[in-house]
Amino acid sequence: MTKSELIAELAAANPHLPARDIEQIVQTIFHEISAALARGDRVELRGFGAFTVKKRDSRTGEIVAVEEKVVPFFKAGKELRERVNHQDGAES
């Protein structure tokens, strides 16, 4: 699902809200999650999962050296894992 598809789904589920307001809400949520991760904070959405940043050490290979960097990391929550693994009609 793309961001525009998410906005369209939310707009369809909430016809009383203008699409531009829904777009602003989605943009704001993504911006705040990104800003928190940029500060090194952890973002936890109960039932969904947690976003954190992890430090990757630098390493030197024979061909190229890779500098140290910080990368975003997502760990799915229990409810999300269960929902993905036990979908209606899915084989176990």
Image (cartoon, rainbow, N blue to C red):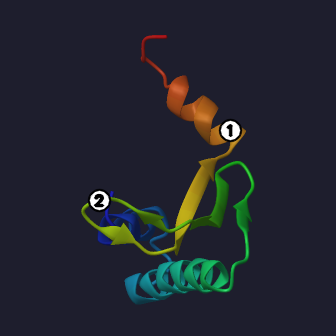
Which amino acid type is marked by label 1?
Glu
Q: Measured from the top left, where is residue 90 in percent x and y?
A: 42, 17
Q: Residue at x 57, y 79 (%)?
A: 29
Q: Secondary structure at mark 1?
A: helix
Give the CA distance from mark 2 to mark 1: 44 Å
The answer to whether residue 46 is left or right of residue 17 is right
Asked where in the image residue 62 lies, by quadrant, the reply is bottom left
- For disc 1, the marked residue is 79
50 shown above or below 19: above
Q: Measured from the top left, where is residue 33 in percent x and y?
A: 60, 77
Q: Quadrant of the N terminus?
A: bottom left
Q: Residue furthest front?
A: 62
The answer to whether residue 52 is left or right of residue 91 is right
Q: Measured from the top left, where is residue 61 in percent x and y?
A: 35, 59
The residue carrying pointer 1 sits among few (fewer than 14), some (14 to 19) or many (20 or more) residues within 10 Å by Cα, namely few
92 shown above or below 77: above
- For disc 2, the marked residue is 62
Closer to us: 71 or 8: 71
| Pair 2/1: label in front | 2
20 shown above or below 26: below
Which amino acid type is marked by label 2?
Glu
The answer to whether residue 35 is left or right of residue 21 is right
Q: Residue at x 48, y 22 (%)?
A: 88
Closer to us: 64 or 53: 64
